[in-house]
Image: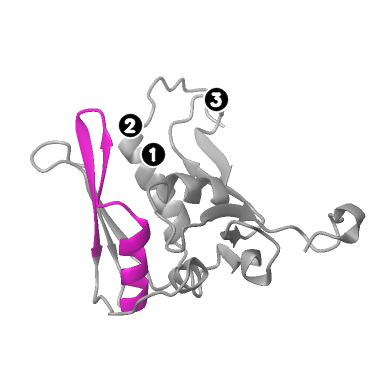
């Protein structure tokens, strides 16, 4: 570790792109192209995929732009779009994260009659995500978080198709966590 003192922090649009990268960069079917030019058209990120269903799913869950004060980050999806009409939030997220090493599964227990309001749980792998971000609260400058927290922020404006909710969660290690009274689904 260096004894250099760093007195800078990442701008919020850089942090947002770092979160996009942390969530999607490991997916072999997705590539991110980032331009942090704040002059001219401003910063932008292009998320490219050759998978039409993934491109369509990305366009449904991500905003086209994110405002940070007087700076607007433009987000565009590049790739062929399919005409797929996702019939459920579960199907949408299963398609979006197909073959992604960060994703575990999704479940909609309301379909089984457990809940009054439909809710889809989007479950990510159980691991800590770290990325450099000029974090002054860490000696290495990294942010340590979970995929569920990143997803909750990135998909903040996503409206559920079925009128229910979406919860972003982290999977549990098998055998490490018990169920209260053994009754939880």
Q: Please say whether residue 37 is visible from this viewpoint.
A: yes
Q: Which residues are magenta?
A: 52-77
Q: Does 98 appear above or below 32?
A: below
62 is within the stretch colored magenta = yes
Q: Which residue is painted at 51% across and 69% down in the image?
A: 100
Q: Does 145 appear above or below 79?
A: above
Q: Is residue 168 left or right of residue 60?
A: right
Farthest residue in the right direction?
A: 181
Residue 35: image x %, image y %?
22, 48
Residue 161: image x %, image y %?
42, 63
User: In the rendered picture of this protein, how many numbered marks are placed on residues?
Assistant: 3
Q: Are marks 2 and 1 in contact (CB under 8 Å)?
A: yes
Residue matched to label 3: 137
Tell me the tag on residue 15: 1
Residue matched to label 2: 11
Q: Is residue 63 left or right of residue 129?
A: left
Q: Which residue is painted at 31% across and 38% down in the image?
A: 13
Of 137 and 7, which appears nearest the observer? 137
Label located before the other in sequence (2 or 3): 2
Residue 182: image x %, image y %?
89, 60
Q: Which residue is painted at 21% across and 43% down in the image?
A: 43
Q: In 3D space, how far apart are the residues under numbered discs 2 and 3 (Cα atoms)?
A: 15 Å
Neighbor class of circle 3 (other Cα within 10 Å; few <14, some 14-19, many 20+) is few
**Tag in front: 3 or 1:** 1
Q: Does 22 appear above or below 57?
A: above
């Amino acid at each position: 570790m260096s004894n250099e003192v760093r007195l800078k922090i990442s701008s919020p649009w850089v942090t947002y792109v770092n979160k996009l990268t942390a969530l999607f960069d490991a997916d072999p079917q997705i590539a991110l192209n980032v331009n942090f030019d704040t002059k001219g058209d401003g910063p932008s990120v292009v998320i490219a995929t050759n998978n039409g269903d993934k491109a369509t799913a990305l366009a449904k869950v991500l905003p086209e732009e994110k405002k940070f004060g007087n700076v607007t980050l433009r987000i565009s999806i590049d790739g062929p779009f399919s005409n797929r009409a996702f019939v459920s939030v579960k199907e949408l997220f299963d398609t979006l994260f197909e073959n992604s090493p960060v994703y575990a599964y999704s479940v909609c227990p309301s379909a089984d009659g457990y809940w009054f309001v439909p809710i889809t749980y989007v479950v990510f792998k159980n691991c800590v995500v770290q990325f450099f971000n000029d974090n002054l609260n860490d000696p290495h400058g990294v942010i340590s978080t979970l995929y569920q927290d990143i997803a909750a922020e990135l998909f903040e404006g996503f409206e559920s198709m079925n009128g229910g909710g979406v919860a972003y969660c982290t999977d549990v290690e098998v055998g490490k966590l018990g169920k209260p009274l053994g009754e939880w689904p």
